[in-house]
Each structure stands twice: as C-alpha cells, then as structure tokens.
Image (cartoon, grey):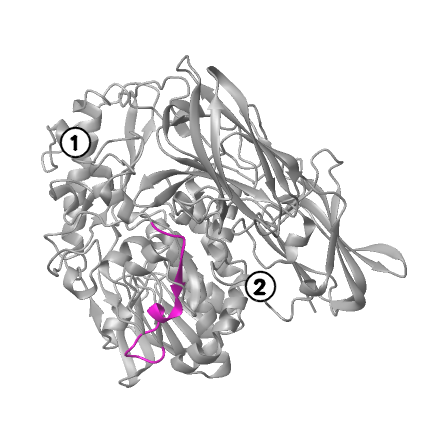
Amino acid sequence: MSIQIKESYDVVVVGGGLAGFSAAVAAARQGVSVCLVQDRPVFGGNSSSEIRVSPHGAACFHAYGRETGIISELLIEERAINHELVTENGWTNSVWDMTMYDMAMSTPGLTFHLNTALLTVQMEHDRKIRSVLCRTAGSETELLLEAEQFIDCTGDGVLADLAGCEWRMGSEGKDEFDEPHAPEQANSEVMGNSIHFKAKDMGRPVPFVLPDWAIRYEDASFFYDQGRKPYDIRSGYWWLEIGVPWHTIHDAERIRHELTRHTLGVWDWIKNRDPQTRELAAHYALDWIGQVPGKRESRRIMGKYLMTEHDPAGRTVFEDEIAFGGWFLDLHTPGGLLAPTSEPSSAEHYDQTTDYAVKSYCGPYGIPLRICMSKDVDNLMMAGRNISVTHAALGTVRVMGTTALIGQAVGVAVAAAVKDNLSADELLRTRIPHIQQQLLRDGCFLPNVCNEDPLDLARLATVAASSEALMYGVGPSSSGTAEFLVDWTETKPQLPEPRPQPYDRDRLNRRVGQWIAVGDRPVKHIELCLGNLSGAEQQVQGYLYAADSIWDYRTEPGEPLAELNLRVPAGEAQWVSVQLELEPGRDFPAFSYLRLDLLAHSHVAWIKAGTVIPGHTSAYEIGGGKMRSLKENRSFRMEPPQNCYAPRQVTNGITRPYRAANLWRANPQEPQEQWLELSWEQPQQLRTVELSFPGHLFHEYHNYPPLYRDPQCAKTYSIQIRQNGSWLEAARVQNNYQRRNVVALAESGSVTTDRLRIVIHETNGDPSAAIYEVRCYN
C-alpha cells in the first residue's frame, strides 16, 4: 500500500534535463524554496549518461558564441575533472551525472526527487495549478507537491497538458506564417528519437555477429549517398533516428526497440560489410548501446508569444529578451532511418553554400520570456523543447545549450514572481529589466542588453592596469594558448580522405573576411600574408568595413571605409601592404571592429594564421548576402598596433567579444603578476567582487580534451584594498579554473576603500593576465 507525503514549496520544477535543472538551480539561488522532480535516476536528460548527447549550442556556428551561466559552470567543471574524451554522441560518462548531482546538493533551498514521475495535476481553478501528484518508483511513495509557481520542463509538456493548456504537435503549413522551412500543408510529422552507441579499441581482432532479429544493411548508398556517413567508427550518430510513422510519445517504447534493431545493423555494416570501415573497425567492440531514446520533438505549449523561424532568421529584438540561440534551423527529415535521406544538410554533404544551408544559418539571436509563459495557466512557465515555438523555429532553439539558458532565465523569472507576488502579466510589465540584469550578473549573456546595474559600484570607478597588451596582428608562424584549437584527427580512426594540396584550404575560392578589433588609435597600415602559386602576378580586390559586431554576417555591412586593389606577386607567402588613413571617431567608433574582406580569386590564398588571438575571427561568403563564421584567423599585421585590450573595457557591461573585444589583457612580455585597479573619488563600502575571466567561449564543449583548464583563466589571484595608504590583501583565490568568480572581501560585513586591485599571480598557462568584467557590490 502506497504512502502519501505532502510538501510545500515556492516553486516546483517538473523535469530534470538541462532546462529543468538550470531553472531549479537558478530559482533556488534567488532565495526561494524549490523542488525539482525528475523521472530518471540522474539529471541531464539527453545529456546524461543514459542517453549521452553532448550539449550543443551557438558556439558550433559562431566564434565566441558559447553559452555562459549555470550551463557554463557545469561544463567547465566536468572538463576539469573528467578523464574521458567527449565527442558529439555516445561518450558522456557518469562523471557528468555527478557534476550535476554535486551542484544540486550544494544549492541551498533546492530539494529534488529522482525516479519520480508526474501522475496528476490538481487545479485551484482553470487558470491556476494548486499541486501536482507524483510517484517515486520502487518506494511505493506518492508525493503531493504544492507551490505558488510551476515550471514544465518535461520535454513532452506533460504538466501543461494535464493542466489543460493548448499545445501543438507537428508542422505548421506555409500558409500560416509563410516560414521558408514550412511544408505547403500542415501535418503531424515531427523529428524522431535517437539512441547512441560507443565502441572501444580492444587491441586485437574482435568479431561481431548480428542477431537474427536486428536489421541487416547491405546498401552503401544508404549511408554515403543519403547523408549517413559513419564519420567516426567509435561512437553513435545523430542520424540513428526513428519517429514517423510512430508517435514519439505514445509509441516511445516501440521506437526504442526499432532503434535497437537498426543500431545493431549499422554497427554490423561498419564492422563487417563497409569496405571503407571494416578494416578500421577490426579491433573495435561495442562498449555501450543506449536504451533510453533521446527525443527531439513532441508537444509545444502555446505561450504569450509564438516564435516563428522569422525571429531567429531575422534576429528579432525583443524587449523581454532573456536568452540567446545560435544553432542553425536544423529540421531532421521525418522518419529518420526510414526516410529516403537523413537531415537535409547531411544529405547535401554539409555543403554550406546550398539554398537550404543559406536559409538555415541564423543567429546569434535573442529569445523572449513570453514564449516560456503559458497563455492558459497563470502560474505555469515552460523551459526546454516544449516552449511556444513553431516546428520550424524549434529546429534552432531545441539544442541543450540554448534550452539550459532558457531554463536559467525562467528560474530567475519565477523567483521574481514569487518574491513580489506578481502575476505573469505584472512580471512582464514591471520586472523584465530586473530579470535581465540579474541574468547578466549571474554570468549570462544577452545580445541586446548590457550591464546597467545601479548597485554595481565598479561602474562608478576609474580603471587602470599594470600593463596592457597591444594587438599587432597574427601570422602563419604565430603560436600561443589563447584559443585551444583541438584536432581530433590524431585521436580517432579516420576514413580515407584526399590529402589537400598546399594552400588549398586558404585559397580564396569565396569571399573571406577577417574581423580586426581596434581601440582608440588611428589605422594607418595593414599587411596581409598572401600566397600566389599561379606563376604570375595576380590582383585581388578587397574592402574594409566598420562592422556592427563580431557576428555581423552581412556580406556588405555598409559603405566600405576603403576599397582595396592588391597586387600579389607569385610566391608561396608574402606580406602585401595596404596604406590607410583612418581615425577613430571620424571613420569608425573607438573600441569596435573593422572587417577586412578579400573577394574570391582562385589563384590567391590568404594564409591561415598559426593561432587565434583573443577577440578575433573570420568568415566566408555562403550566398544570399550572408557570411558564415570560420573559427580561425587569417594572417594580418597592424600599424600602429591597436590598444583593443584596454583596461577600461572591464566595466563596459559586456563579458565576451561582441561589438568590441571587451577584454583587458596584460602585456605578455611583462612579469606574470599583473594587476587591474579600480579607484573611486570617494571611499566605497564593498562586500563582494564578481569577476568574469576569459576562456571557454570560442569552441563547443566537446572540442575540449579531458582534464582541461582554459589557459586564459586566472588560476591564482588576490584582491587587495588600499587603507591608510597601504595595500592590504582582502582575499586570495587559488586553483581556480571557472570563468565566473564571486569573492567575499570579509567574513562578515564590508570593507571601506577608495582603491581596489585584482592581482593575477598565475594563469592556467597563458602568458597574459586577462579579465572580461569586474563588478563590485556592497
């Protein structure tokens, strides 16, 4: 006989994937009582060790686009302590589960129930939830959970459905919103579910015998001509996917069984039949195969706003912006393995210049709070893939890096509603600036909002530093630890690929642009390292623009500041000069970006730089008036060198390269112990200093190796205050690798000072001390 326990909280979150987990932690950190209900034994949803999909996000397609906030804390911690490699799918181990578990256990005000499924919803009236009834597996225990606010992070929208909310499932037709990705007629088709596997090198031949009940594959074209290339024989593939003709909710168990049959068949093809992989796979054995499918799409709950694909594609600016996205409009073919081809981009062999690829590339873009607020139930919000978007828009917002950001924002929003006893409409009308500023303070990034917190005393300070790095440019032989450029080709068995000829990768087959961060100095001279193997002099046309941001991908972002006509002598690599007379304030804003573009020329190569210097990236033209981010630097040199890493930027309100480099970086030629100083005209009472260090922004999470600690991040630093004419150490931090740090200056109370220094004694490997942001609070 079951027992029933009644518990009361301010907020109940149902669903413990990354969206629900982030929502619960964020709300609890705001000082309200929170209960998180998860029907699995671990947190993380699709990212957990049960399913093993590594969290994707904007950084896959945009340099410096990595999500920050709670998701960043988790991923940085996992890489720092986990000994295992991570790839796209199939590699997550239980260290990730325990990283999340540790954060949950360490968060005051957060209670959680694992292995606990939602059964029913009890309504106070038709627009307000009073409680939810849940059951914990294996303990014969029912939980009646009461709360003021509820958040549905179930993925399938189970809570909202039981509460009577309107929802959609399937694809809207083109006639409804005129979305480029919409079919002509509305239908019930959705993206499918997937399971993954992992294979292990045993060091000796290992046989595999396909069970009689599994699917046997014989046709190479199914894989190589239809977008299902086995690109890494060690691990599972996103295209191991099945949905239609089955229902992704009600037929989930049938789908799991069919996926198992097909996954074993795919491994049999790789291991025993594929001429391109069977020798590579000879020593590999199946190490793990998933039995909990990862789900992409089901119910989408209707909110106070319905986001269509026009919003991310057009980068709509919302007053209630609370998160950002940057994944492409990634709509998998309904049916998956049962369809004629896989996801369209893969079926086009990832040619980024096709009509489909051009119309699908988007972001980074803002996300509004209204798509997370139920239009039918006043005390219900949503986070995750069940938010109020069309099928087409879901293609970009559904990835876990983005849903984690949305979850954190919803957690902050519901906490504000609880603490001030606000309705959803009152919250929208009166608390959006507060929510936005709190998210920024908690380490998040919003494309159209910067720090304007009136309580941040650092905004009133004058900033100086012991030294300042100048940006001279970067060349083919440049090296350094600024951005870790991983190359997994050294660690995974490779399918045979043609070896590129010298400079093929650098050749100007398409227009290429290089972003150049500038300070408040003139720009008089730029040199480019170009190759010309044609045997005769060539001429290349180019343009120099003032760029709106590092993500300004318009092929022509305005009237050019200069038109270039470069004469390139024959030779492998030579520096070609451009004379300019550009002044900050007159020709371009101080502390901003220039973008130097060279037009396509088949005989000329713009040589790739040996490293990426902080705040810099490049892009190439894909068509349709768009450029696409290219995570590298092309070689260039500046005269005079630019002071784009000036200390003043640590209080400009932005904590990553965006409209400027936004980074103080010390001179790497100076001794390691460098300092940044804030001074005030009058003494200030200070309790905490909040810091954002560089690192973990340029690449996606799965590009980083085991036990990784970003070299740019400060490892050991102290905070000093001046009192009675002397410098006193108020705090010291050691062995740090996290991007965001909150440091108390006194065990109780505050300190009074008119000058404060952050002294960086040691980084995790980079020669320059560096900081994105300093905040000070009483």
Q: Can you say whether 358 is above or below 730 in the image?
A: above
At a point 18% along the width and 24% down the height, the residue shown is 274
Task: Give the extent of the magenta segment.
Answer: 362-379
Residue 418's mark? none
Q: Can you say whether 396 is above or below 369 in the image?
A: above
Q: Nearer the viewer, residue 270 or 433?
A: 433
Horizontal relation, residue 110 to residue 383: left or right? right
Q: Nearer the viewer, residue 176 or 145?
A: 176
Tell me where residue 121 sits by quadrant.
Answer: bottom left
Dot 1 amino acid type:
Asp
At a point 50% along the width and 58% down the height, the residue shown is 444
Q: Secondary structure at mark 2?
A: loop
Horizontal relation, residue 67 to residue 141: left or right? right
Closer to the eye: label 1 or 2:
2
Mark yes or no: residue 417 visible: yes
Q: Nearer the viewer, residue 707 or 691?
A: 691
How far across and how far down the image is residue 507, in percent?
A: 39, 25
At a point 37% along the width and 58% down the height, the residue shown is 315
Q: Secondary structure at mark 1?
A: loop
Tell me where residue 160 sits by quadrant.
Answer: bottom left
The crowding category of the residue bearing disc 2, from other C-alpha atoms within 10 Å (few below 14, some 14 to 19, many at least 20), is many
- Return the residue at label 2: 451
Q: Can you say whether 142 is above or below 733 in the image?
A: below
Tell me where residue 182 sits by quadrant.
Answer: bottom left
How far across and how far down the image is residue 545, in percent?
A: 49, 44
